[in-house]
Image (spheres, rainbow, N blue to C red):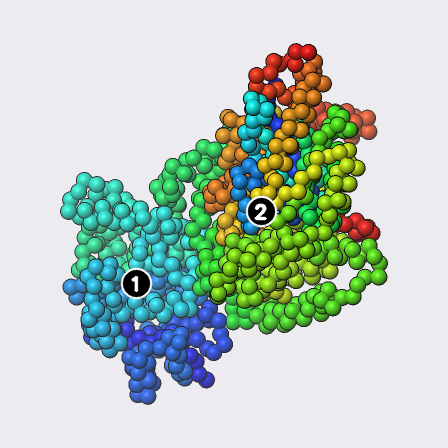
Amino acid sequence: MSSRKKNILKVIILGDSGVGKTSLMHRYVSDKFSQQYKATIGADFLTKEVTMDGDKVATMQVWDTAGQERFQSLGVAFYRGADCCVLVYDVTNAKSFENIKSWRDEFLVHANVSSPDTFPFVILGNKLDVEESKKVVSNRAAQDMAKSLGNVPLFLTSAKGSINVDTAFEEIARNALQQSQADADAFEDDFNDAINIQLDGEPSSCGC
Amino acid sequence: MYTELLFCKSKVFVHCSSKSEDNIPGFLLITRDTQQANLDATLTWIPEKELDRAQYDELMRADLQGVGAQRKIRVKKDVVVQALYAAWAFTVKVSSIYSIQFRPPSPSGWWFGSVAIHCNNPSELDSIPVLFFHDNICPSTREKQKNLSKSFDPFSGNDIYWGANDVRDALLEVADLKQTFVDPSVWLVNATLDDLRNFSADSLKRKSQDARKESSAASTGSTKFWDVLDQAKWNLMAKFADLTTKSTNKMTDMFNQHPIVKFVDKHNSNPYVKQILTNPKVQEIQDDFDSAKIYLAKWALGVKEQAERYQTANGLDDSYRRLLFHELGSDGEDVQLTDEELNIALQRSHPLSVNKWKTFFDSEGRLVLTVQEVKDYIFHGGIGDPSLRKEVWLFLLDVYPWDSSAEDRKVLEKTLRDGYRANYKSRWEYREAHLDEDEEAYWLDQVLRIEKDVKRNDRDLPLYKHNTENGQPPSIPVGEDQANEDVENDVWTVKNPHLQKLRSILLSYNIYNNDLGYVQGMCDLLSPIYYILEDEELSFWAFVSFMNRMERNFLRDQSGIRDQMLTLTDLCHLMLPKMSDHLAKCDSSNLFFCFRMLIVWFKREFEFNDVCSIWEVFLTDFYSSQFQLFFMLAVLQKNSGPVMNNLDQFDQVLKFFNELRGTMDWNDLMIRSELLFVKFKKIMDILERKEELNEYTLLTADGNVITETSAMAVDNSLQAQPSLVTANLKQLLSKKIVVKREPPREKNSIR
């Protein structure tokens, strides 16, 4: 296993087209926002160094994907080895909210994660900056949904207004880190697995 | 009967002998019958003495006042017809002229400037005398000279004005003239692409200029003389090489009789003889002998080959050429690219101009070339003039049939416009809610998807940038609040008229192709088409035709795009085996990283104008209807070094190729694509022949017809060595577009 694979936390962003996946990624990684993002075709990722709990350094790889459903079958390749999945809806678009669950199911079917029940998801309700009258998804409904999916953390964000994005991604990073450690533990005897992730300063076996 | 006079020059002489009393003054005219195409314009020389007083006066007036495309004069057709019967006179269609040599007058007045016309048809050769321009007695030329000398700028660097400049300018109005690099005095008229390749490569122009500089140094006795001479000789000969191969032996014999030819022939290798030829006095004698052109042509026998060799050896950018040959030239075994193949791919320097394009059509607007010839131009040079794109793309995108006349196209255009509005646009403009709830939801969802992508389509381009009713920047600077509202996430309405039209076309296409539905990327495909045509109805039909071949990229089950990625895998395996192995090690053999490039034909990887240039090459189907895969292969080939040396993970490879966006040189890649295709075809030929050979030996090994069991055995032995020639690869040799349709949409399948 190559050494560069260590320290990488892989995060996948999913959601309907136009909910702001690309914008969220750019806001988080480079603190930029543009009106001129085009519909994402294929997949791309950006990386960002993150420090957690004061001393743990890791590289977060944020994967941005196309929102159109029919492209997902080809995207399976990059689901593999994910440590956290971010589900995004648009607070002005009810349909995108209703689809959150199917995005989660879709991910679980294709990503082949070791324990689907504990795999971390985070839900983001984006476009919080839009005026109240245009919002159609209530906070209440969102909280209910998050709860029903297994107490998934929920954040209301605005990539454009830079609201809550960093907070949300800190939570995402924490979840991803936990997941990668759990995976590392589960596979500590099985070195063949590609998602055996270790952190700097940690012994190669977890020592327990 | 009248004809339009497009140009007239007086005091153009034919010198019948070396005695000045034998010189015949006349008029040089360019005429064209009304309603006829440029191709039918005629060049006529008629002696003054054939004209009656009225005609003479009329033409003198026309000469002095100047006529042209803007200022046409109608004259009796008799003027032109007379030329058919008068001695020395000639009339020739501009389209049948091969080249024209403009030999300027001597600055010191030693000789007159002259024009030698060479025709495509050898039988016309001897009927056209060299024309001498007696500028000193030509009123229009004198008038112009006077005006020019008033504003004389010694540093302008322009050529000295003389009478034939006007002829050249006038011809440029009706034909495509290209100066040759071998001899700047020679201009090709409506040259074929092959001649352009041989005679006017831009990269060579520079070199020959350098050589000319040296050549003037040489006449003062420089030691480089011989080298330069070699080139000079070639210069003289090459331009007539093509002509000579067409000329008859009789003609050659005739001019062999000339004393100068005899003399020069005898002392062919003597440098002094050649120097003598550049002496003005000698030149004058040559000119007198009316057919200097063929005297020179004499030398050119068999020189075409030499010309090509020269071009190969010296002409093109050597280092780039060597690099390409090194990288792509050979597979280390049987396959090797020839010089000619390299040359053709390398010379992408003759973009299609408006003038050139006009010469492709007759007076009825029908193509006079084969479609493949036209496509050769587009494939190898693209469309030079953006305004020409609109017309050419309508052909390339099959809106207009290649064999249609102008009238056909007019009728067709009307039918298409009406059809679009009546059968497609009106069906959603005036629609009522669907009775079936699911269908209604489906439609509303489609509208939403289309709008979402239209709003974020190429907003950096001026046409689509401003969301105002006229598409212009808002006249009153908008305040912060208003600006915000304007670009508010999903809730703003499309006001820009061009974005609205994109939306209309995509909605109409949704009606047209009800099974496919809107898929992301389709707006990317429409955007350049609309940008170029700027016409809603025609863009719709162009898009329909484009989608006919692109639909397979968007199928619900992704089978069409997957097919292409599998073909590409085979292609990469065959053509770039090392790269192919390496990608497999990187867990990237599915070539997922090519997805974006393939699905929208590199639209996201290049600047908008480059995208148009790339697409028009693909659209020709010149070599293969799937040339995009060779372009993709060129991207892989070009980057194989860094990928193999540095990358070993799936995500690294994806990132690497994603980040090529905006950094690639499409021209270089197109040259590589062509070379890769040519090489691919050779390899396929060899492999197929080998396989045929194998089958043959198997069949005759024991002299019997193979039984079913032995056929099985054969099968097994072949399995051990899987064939490289897959069906996918074979299909790449086809120019027929691959069409794959979405099967009928199931109820409530919205995806």
- Labels 2 and 1 share a subunit: no
Q: Can residue A190 be seen in this snapshot?
A: yes
Residue B102 circle label: 1
Element class at badge 2: loop
Residue pictured at 76% horizontal, 26% vertical:
A115
Which residue lies most toward the right here?
B436
What's the CA distance linking mark 2 and mark 1?
66 Å
Which one is nearer the viewer's eye here, B505 or B328? B505
Q: Do we see residue B728 in this rendering?
A: no
Residue B487: where, in percent of width, then height?
Answer: 58, 55
Q: Position of residue B209 (x, y in %)?
A: 28, 49
The mark found on residue A143 in the picture is none
Q: At 52% from the left edge and 57% from the top edge, which residue is drawn?
A: B480
- Camera-near label (2 vs 1) is 2
- The residue lying furthest to the top in this view is A207
Q: Quadrant of residue B530?
A: bottom right
* Residue indicated by mark 2: A160
Q: Quadrant of residue A124?
A: top right
Observer-nearest residue: B249 or B72?
B72
On screen, residue B14 above or below A10 = below
